[in-house]
Image: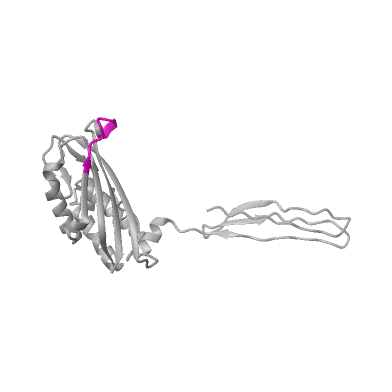
Amino acid sequence: MVAMASALYTCTSPLIKPTKPQLSLIKSSSSSLQFTPTQKTLNNSSLKSVAKFSISAVSTPIAETSAQNSSYKPSKILPFRVGHGFDLHRLEPGYPLIIGGINIPHDRGCEAHSDGDVLLHCVVDAILGALGLPDIGQLFPDNDPKWKGADSSVFLKEAVRLMDEAGYELGNLDATLILQRPKVSPHKEVIKANLSALLGADPSVVNLKAKTHEKVDSLGENRSIAAHTVVLLMKK
């Protein structure tokens, strides 16, 4: 944030011209910003005018705010909430391809800090977004060794816990996978069943679609995989 200040002085004396103070930036010991005008003395035989004021602007870093609010509860109760999640990972040889918690046979998989499950990651972000909470990267940072190679179902279970704690349940979920290969259709039902179980939801409210990228860019060249998810949360 940037604090802006302006001052206007009106003087009725014909001998003294209005003077606009000059602002100087001073950093205080409390790490706030203070704007203090340079003092001006008007040399008149009977008048000396000194104007002085300060404005402080203090902001708390997002990381500190998140650390202080360990419960991550949404600030406002609404009858329903909508969230969108997106994720993309590079595909590289030597990695397993995990989609929705299911190991899909392929000659390459997602290069990531955790298991690289692009579907579960975007579902987590959709739920967190609907609740107005920090995203998956803030809750489970990829520079934390604790999450190296972690099963992404851990992240989803935490998102579901936060959803339940906030007093919401899943209304419905619609997800779209984008990848050129392999074909998702042979694995679609088992992925959907596992995702529904992790969410604690009836399969009838969970929808999964898959699209190719028509051989365009990294997605169409089998060098990456992406997913979008939209969720509707309803107050219990």
Give the vertical position of 22 relative to 201 (above or below): above
Where in the figure is residue 155, as x and y percent of width and height?
23, 55
Specify start and end residues of the magenta stretch as a single range.
210-219
Q: Is residue 37 magenta?
A: no
Where in the figure is residue 76, as x and y percent of width and height?
39, 66
- The residue positioned 17% from the left and 60% from the top of the image is 202
Give the vertical position of 152 relative to 45 (above or below): above
- The residue positioned 21% from the left and 55% from the top of the image is 206
- The residue positioned 70% from the left and 60% from the top of the image is 52
| Image side of residue 120 versus residue 20, left or right | left
Q: Is residue 216 magenta?
A: yes
Q: In front here: 204 or 87? A: 204
Q: Residue furthest front?
A: 204
Where in the figure is residue 128, as x and y percent of width and height?
31, 57
Q: Quadrant of the C terminus?
A: bottom left
Quarter holding residue 166: bottom left
Quarter holding residue 95: top left
Q: How many discs mark residues in the rendered view? A: 0
| Image side of residue 180 versus residue 132, left or right | left
Where in the figure is residue 27, as x and y percent of width and height?
56, 54
Q: In front here: 50 or 182? A: 182
Q: In front here: 119 or 49? A: 119
